[in-house]
């Protein structure tokens, strides 16, 4: 039985290099890799060795015989990526194995390459990993929250535990020689770019895209209007969003935009709270969801079904878990889009998405449990309501017609947006720091990786090749002598941080928070998160203090 890649594929490509027969595509050197929704195993070429299973950081790969019923559609999805052939016939080999991107070779002889990384999400951790493949490199990771891993902790939906398994890889990176955490330290607030440059050869910003794109229509800002990304922060226990006013007192919620974030939000708002109680969802969110009156979440897209922004794996996962329906008019749109579609391989994914949509139930059927309605060709015009949102009025896209949908909460889910970084240039239109392959244009010894470099698209693993590209540039600059040696002595950085931010947390502190959260999960939940900074600091304070010997050894290592 061949192996199959399933919904939680993060596209980091580790499986590609583990595969001895090059049967996983697109591989990082192939043109489709940057934009693919997932990677696919060729069932005719797979030798069933399972090497990819151990390499995958999110547990997305399994033998076809061991898939759950909900995962069965992924057998066809994997096979469908490859051209049809008679059974048993293999594809002509393009190359023996996917060429491994060579690790950047750091030339020794000068003061050891020392890099500050700002942020601790996937792009930051993959960059640290890549740098630490080289001997004698030091990496200091600065994170403004007391907890690391960015959107893996605060963005991935709680009912996607497999995706969160990538934190085991990140934990392994923190244990590598040369890695140091400075958590609860905000660069731009407690330390500046030049402070960091006094102690490092380079600063690599992997700060993500913390804002969300705003919808400029009348009524946005009324109570009952909000953004999906803030709601995601709320149910994931991000300390900035614990007090978010969440209006679950009416029967309907409308989400504007139909990307994967919209699907995450709709799924959580309609999920069975008893099932959520087995996840790491924040306690405050679980309590509110238990009292929710929401019976329907409408996901409203301005374009038609063929242009849906969600990915096929996420749509398959959604329809396996939740009740998802379409209005009869939208069923007609699906049929129309299917009829207009070409038969070429470039239309394969769209056809597969439309096929899934065409099999959904109709919104005419009576409501038996909270459900999700996908709605199309609705361009948001204005929020309806005087003191709070009562609903939203749309124009029917491409017509003069309008349509009103009543709702107690309207959430925009129209994408994340990068925020300007102090001391760096910023492209306000694109929401990114202008850069050339990760090298920041016009700032000394500054580099970027992840969403602040390329914009808010892609999956967790997309950040691996993105970070590798940046690290290649950084190391080339170091080798060419472009990066000035740090002027301050090793050890001075720890003193500076302690002076500017006495509440900074180190790796031991994070481990103490992590252990306390897991213990609070009582074996029923993977963890019960702390959702406010004082509780996190209190848990970190329980970390064992290093002995004098350990402190001396750590000082020598630095
Ligand atoms: P997204 O995929 O870019 O979707 C944005 C949606 O907003 C689209 O439907 C877009 O419609 C719509 N939109 C934009 N401007 C609009 C406007 N003015 N009026 C109405 N609609 C508007 O964004 P996202 O959902 O925030 O996701 C961000 C990235 O994270 C994506 O790469 C996504 O795949 C990834 N992600 C992945 C997962 C996962 O794998 N489980 C989960 C969450 C996020 P148009 O298409 O018409 O522009």
Image: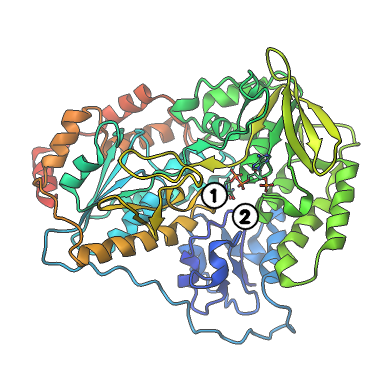
Please tell me which residue lies in front, 461 or 199: 199
Q: Position of residue 471 (x, y in %)?
A: 33, 60
Looking at the image, the residue that sits furthest to the top is: 387
State the residue in front, 325 or 115. 115
Query: Viewed as shown, does residue 45 lie left or right of 393?
Result: left
Which of labels 1 and 2 is toward the front?
A: 2
Crowdedness near tag 1: few (<14), some (14–19) or many (≥20) residues, C-alpha within 10 Å: some
Residue for point 41% across, 32% down: 517
* The residue carrying mark 2 has its beta carbon less than 8 Å from ligand 1: yes
Which one is earlier in the sequence, the residue at label 1 or at label 2? 2
Please indicate whether residue 431 sits to the left or right of residue 178 in the image: right
- Residue at the spot x=66%, y=67% of the render? 78
User: What separation in Å lies between label 1 and label 2 (alpha carbons)?
Assistant: 9 Å
In the image, ligand 1 is in what quadrant? top right
Residue 156 visible in the current orientation = no
Secondary structure under the numbered disc 2 in the rendered image: loop
Colour mode of the rendering: rainbow
Which class describes the residues within 10 Å of circle 2: few (<14), some (14-19), or many (20+)?
many
x and y percentages locating residue 436 in the rendered image:
39, 59
In the rendered view, would you say 106 is above or below 270? Answer: below
* Label 1 lies in ligand 1 vicinity (Cβ under 8 Å): no
| Mark linked to residue 239 | none
Residue 526, compared with residue 533, is above or below; it is below
Disc on res. 162: 1
Q: Is the Cβ of the residue at disc 1 closer than 8 Å to that at disc 2?
A: yes
Whether residue 195 is visible, yes or no, is yes
Where residue 336 appears, x then y in whole percent?
A: 88, 55
Q: Quadrant of residue 306?
A: bottom right
Q: Which residue is mark 2?
A: 7
User: Dot 1: what SS?
Assistant: helix
Residue 102 location (% of width, % of height): 35, 72
């Amino acid at each position: 039985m061949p192996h199959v890649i399933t919904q939680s594929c993060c596209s980091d490509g580790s499986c590609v290099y583990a595969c001895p027969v090059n049967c996983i595509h697109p591989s990082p050197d192939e043109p489709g890799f940057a934009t693919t929704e997932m990677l696919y195993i060729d069932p005719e070429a797979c030798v069933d060795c399972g090497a990819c299973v151990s390499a995958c950081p999110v547990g997305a790969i399994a033998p076809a015989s061991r898939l759950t019923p909900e995962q069965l559609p992924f057998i066809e999805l994997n096979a469908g990526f490859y051209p049809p052939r008679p059974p048993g016939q293999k594809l002509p080999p393009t190359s023996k194995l996917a060429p491994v991107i060579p690790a950047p070779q750091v030339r020794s002889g000068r003061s050891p390459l020392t890099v500050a990384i700002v942020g601790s999400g996937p792009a930051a951790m993959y960059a640290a990993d890549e740098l630490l493949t080289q001997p004698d490199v030091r990496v200091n990771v600065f994170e403004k929250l007391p907890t690391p891993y960015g959107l893996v902790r605060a963005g991935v939906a709680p009912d996607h535990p497999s995706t969160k398994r990538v934190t085991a890889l990140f934990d392994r990176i923190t244990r590598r020689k040369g890695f140091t955490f400075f958590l609860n330290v905000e660069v731009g607030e407690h330390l500046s770019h030049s402070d960091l440059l006094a102690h490092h050869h380079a600063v690599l910003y992997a700060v993500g895209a913390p804002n969300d794109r705003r919808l400029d229509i009348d009524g946005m800002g009324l109570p009952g209007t909000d953004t999906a990304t803030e709601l995601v922060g709320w149910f994931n226990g991000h300390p900035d969003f614990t007090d978010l006013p969440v209006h679950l007192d009416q029967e309907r919620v409308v989400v504007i935009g139909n990307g994967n974030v919209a699907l995450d939000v709709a799924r959580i708002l309609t999920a069975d709270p008893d099932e959520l109680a087995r996840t790491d969802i924040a306690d405050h969110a679980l309590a509110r969801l238990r009292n929710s009156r929401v019976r329907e979440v409408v996901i409203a897209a301005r374009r038609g079904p063929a242009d849906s922004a969600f990915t096929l794996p996420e749509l398959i996962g959604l329809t396996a878990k939740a009740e998802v329906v379409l209005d009869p008019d939208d069923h007609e749109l699906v049929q129309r889009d299917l009829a207009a579609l070409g038969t070429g391989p470039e239309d394969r994914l769209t056809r597969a998405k439309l096929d899934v949509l065409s099999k959904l139930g109709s919104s005419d059927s009576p409501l038996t449990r909270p459900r999700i309605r996908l709605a199309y060709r609705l361009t948001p015009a204005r929020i309806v309501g005087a003191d709070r949102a009562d609903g939203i009025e749309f124009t029917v896209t491409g017509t003069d017609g309008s349509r009103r949908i009543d709702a107690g909460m309207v959430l925009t889910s129209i994408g994340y947006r990068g925020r300007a970084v102090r001391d760096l240039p910023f492209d306000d239109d694109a929401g990114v720091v202008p850069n050339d392959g990760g090298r920041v244009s016009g700032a000394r010894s500054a580099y970027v990786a992840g969403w602040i470099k390329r914009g808010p698209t892609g999956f967790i693993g997309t950040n691996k090749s993105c970070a590798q590209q940046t690290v290649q540039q950084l190391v080339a600059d170091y080798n060419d002598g472009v990066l000035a040696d740090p002027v301050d002595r090793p050890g001075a950085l720890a003193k500076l941080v302690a002076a500017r931010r006495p509440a900074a947390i180190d790796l031991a502190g994070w481990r103490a928070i992590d252990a306390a959260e897991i213990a609070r999960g009582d074996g029923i939940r993977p963890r019960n998160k702390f959702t406010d900074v004082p509780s996190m600091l209190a848990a970190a304070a329980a970390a064992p203090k290093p002995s004098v010997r350990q402190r001396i050894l750590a000082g020598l290592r630095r």
